[in-house]
Amino acid sequence: MGLKSELLNDVDKDYLLCAYSNMLNGHNRLNSLDKTIVEKLTKKLTLTQVKKIHLNYILGIAPEKTGIEIKKTGDLDDMIKILSKQFGRKNVFLEVPVNGKNCDAIILNGKNSEITAVEIKSSRDRLNKAIEQCKNYLDWADFVYLFIDGTHRNKIVVNEFFKNNKVGILVYNYGLLNVEKFAKNNKINLDNFLRSFSLVHLLNVAKYYNIPTLSKREELIKLLKSNLTFMQIKRGIIKSITKSFYSLSDF
C-alpha cells in the first residue's frame, strides 16, 4: 500500500467525499457506498492534496474552508437546506398533514406524477417513532425515505424493518446528502391513497376535473374512483398540495 492510500484510508469516507467535491466546486460523481473510493482518489489526487486532506481531518478542520471546525452532524435546518438543494426548492413542501400526521417533507414530481415522503431525524431527534411514521407514508407515497443525521446511521442500517422494506435511507454527513439505500417504488392501494387525504384535497381534485362535488367523504371517493384514473387522481392531489401549501421557494 502506497503512502497516498495509507493516508486516505485513515480519513472518514464522507469527509473524503466532501473535500474532493469542494476541489471540484461541488461536481462530485463519487459515492460513499463505492468500496473503491480510496483507490479512485489515489489516482485522482496528488500526494500534496492527500496530505492536506489528511492533516485537516486529523486537526478537525472542515473540508469546506480552512480554519472552520467540522460540522459533521446536522440540525433540522441544515437537513432541510440540503433537501431543497438536491430536489429543488419549488418541489419541497414542509409539514404537510396527510393520513392524520404531519409529514416532515413532501417532494412533488409533477412531470411523473410522483409523490415522495421524507421523514427527517436530525441529530437532536429520537428514533422511536421512525418505523410507525414511515409505515404511515407507505399508504399514500410513491417513494418513502428516512433522512437521518449520520449519528443515527449505525442504529438504522441494522434495523430489520429498514433492511427489508421499500423505505429508502438518506444520511446527512459533513453537509452532504448520501444515499445509504434507494427507496423502491411503492405500489399504492387506491382506497388507502384516497382516504389518506383530507376532504378539502378530494374536493379540489373533483373541481379540477369538473366533477360534481359532494360533501360526504365516502360518496365523493366513489365518484372520483368511477370517473378518474389513479394517475388523474394523483395529479389532482399534487395540484391541490401545490395550491394549499408553501414550497421552500416561497421563503
Image (spheres, rainbow, N blue to C red):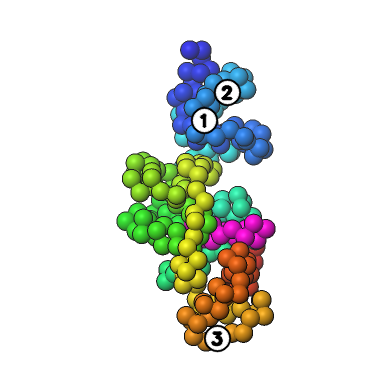
Amino acid at dot 3: Leu
Q: Circles 1 and 2: CB distance less than 8 Å?
A: yes
Picture quarter with the C terminus = bottom right
Q: Does the image show residue 87?
A: yes
Q: What residue is at 53 percent from the left and 45 percent from the top?
A: 177
The numbered disc on residue 40 is 2
Residue labelled with disc 1: 34
Identify whether 117 is placed above or below 58: below
Q: What residue is at 51 percent from the left and 42 percent from the top?
A: 178
Secondary structure beneath disc 1? loop
Q: What residue is at 33 percent from the left and 45 percent from the top?
A: 160
* Count of residue discs: 3
Secondary structure beneath disc 2? helix
N-terminal of the pair, mark 1 or mark 2, is 1
The local crowd at label 3, few if under 14, some if 14 to 19, many if 20 or more residues have their Cα within 10 Å, is: some
Identify whether 30 is placed above or below 117: above
Amino acid at dot 1: Asp
Q: CA distance from mark 1 to mark 2?
A: 10 Å
The numbered disc on residue 214 is 3
Whether the magenta-drawn stretch holds residue 226 is answered as no
Front-lying residue, 174 or 214: 214
Identify whether 209 is placed above or below 77: below
